[in-house]
Amino acid sequence: MSKADKDNQYCVKVQLWKKGFLKKTLNKDFFTKLDDAERYYNSCEKEGTKVQLSKFKNGHEKTIKEKNN
């Protein structure tokens, strides 16, 4: 495994939004494997939340997927 692969992390955020404003971040979990992050992303089905899957690489965050429940 190269050093670049070790620097990659995946984050799944579960947030509560109201009238276009962020009210609260309920969960923020980090994963080293994309498969684990996607499995957790797909399991988040709480009503009224926004779930975001993003990738951290060298200190920068990039959103991969996003869904509203």
Image (cartoon, rainbow, N blue to C red):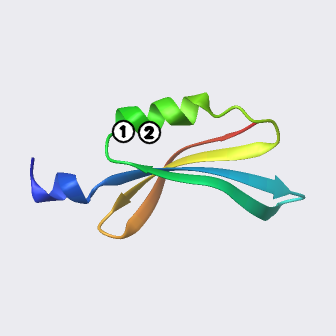
> Which residue is situated farthest in the left direction here?
2
Q: Which residue is mark 1?
A: 34
Whether label 2 touches label 1, CB < 8 Å? yes
Q: Nearer the viewer, residue 60 or 42?
A: 42
Residue 29, position as x, y percentages in the image: 50, 51
Residue found at the very far bottom of the displayed protein? 59
Q: From the viewer's perspective, is 22 left or right of 7? A: right
In screen coordinates, is 14 left or right of 9? Answer: right
- Real-space CA distance between mark 2 and mark 1, rounded to the nearest whole angstrom: 5 Å
Is 55 on the left-hand or right-hand side of 22? left
Q: Which residue shows up at 64% across the image and 34% down it?
A: 44
Depicted 63 relative to depicted 41: above or below? below
* Residue wearing tag 2: 37
Q: Amino acid at mark 2?
A: Ala
Amino acid type of disc 1? Leu
Residue shown at 36%/38% (left/top)? 34
- Secondary structure beneath dot 1 equals helix
Residue plotted at (59% across, 48% down): 52
